[in-house]
Amino acid sequence: DIQMTQSPSSLSASVGDRVTITCRASQGITNYLAWFQQKPGKAPKSLIYAASSLQSGVPSKFSGSGSGTDFTLTISSLQPEDFATYYCQQYYTYPYTFGQGTKLSI
Amino acid sequence: QVQLQESGPGLVKPSETLSLTCTVSGGSISSYYWSWIRQSPGKGLEWIGYIYSSGSTTYNPSLKSRVTISVDTSNNQFSLKLTSVTAADTAVYYCARGQQFLGKVPFDYWGQGTLVTVSS
C-alpha cells in the first residue's frame, strides 16, 4: 500500500494567517491527490482533487500544488470556520489511502 | 445538491454481519462510483471499496474476504456487508461518491457517517 505522511500533525495559527500543510507519498502518484477538511463530528468535505483542482463551491483561499511524491495544501487568510483537521488521500492505485491528518487549531 | 445518507444498526455483535445502506438523493446513482470508507481512532480513515453503478466492484485487499458492496439503482441506494466482525471493525462508516476524472476516481460528496459499534 502507498503510505501518505502529512506534516505537521498539528498546527496553531491565527485568524488572517496563511498556512501550508505538506503531504508526502511513499511512491509516486503523479497528481492523483485529494485534500479533505473535517470538523469534529462531521463528515469530511472534499476540497481539492488532482492535486490542484478545486471542488465545486470551494473558495479560492484553498490551493493545492505538487506532483510525484510531494504535495502541499495552502490556506490563505484563515477564518474561524477554517479551523479543522485536513487529510490528504491518494487515488492513484488501490487501495486508496489517507494521510493521518493535520489538526489546524486557533 | 447531491446528498448521501447512511443507515443501519449502530450495534453489531462479534462474529455477526454488519449491514449498512447509503441512500443517494438529489442526483442519479448511474455513471458514478460509490464508496464505503470508515474512520476509527486507531486506524484513521480506511477505504473499504467501491461499486460502479453497473455493478462492478473493487475492494481493499485487507478486507476483501469479508466485504460485499451492492447497488440498487431502482432505489438510488448502495449497500455494504461486512462479515465476521470484531471489535476492530468499530468505526464511523461513511459512504461517498466518486466521479471519474482523467482515468481515476476522486471523491466529491460524502455522507454524514454512522457509528457502528461491535460489542456483545
Image (spheres, rainbow, N blue to C red):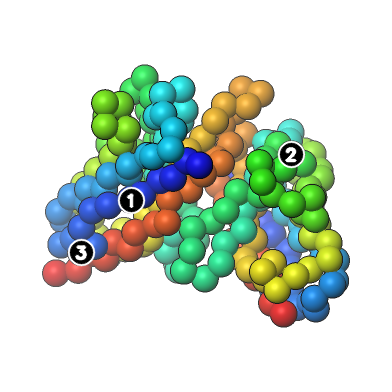
Q: Which mark is residue A53?
A: 2
Q: Position of residue A63 (x, y in %)?
A: 79, 50
> Is disc 3 placed on a helix, strand or loop?
strand
Q: Depth check: give the residue in front, A9 or A80.
A: A80
Q: Are marks 1 and 3 on the same chain?
A: yes
The mark lying in front, picked from 3 and 2, is 2
The amino acid beneath tag 3 is Leu
Disc 2 is attached to a residue of which chain? Answer: A
Going from N to C along the chain, the mark reached first, 1 or 3, is: 1
Q: Name the residue located 41 percent from the left edge and 24 percent from the top edge.
A: B30
Q: Depth check: give the residue in front, B100 or B47.
A: B100
**Residue that carries the numbered disc 3 in the rendered image:** B11
The amino acid beneath tag 2 is Ser
Q: Are marks 2 and 1 on the same chain?
A: no
Separation of disc 3 and disc 2 at Cα?
39 Å
Q: Which mark is residue B57?
A: none
Residue at the farthest top position: B54
> Is B98 left or right of B17, judged from the image as shown?
right
The amino acid beneath tag 1 is Glu
Vertical arrangement, residue A78 with respect to residue A14, above or below: above
**Residue that carries the numbered disc 1 in the rendered image:** B6
> Is disc 1 placed on a helix, strand or loop?
strand
Q: Position of residue A81 (x, y in %)?
A: 67, 69
Q: Name the residue located 67 percent from the left edge and 46 percent from the top edge.
A: A57
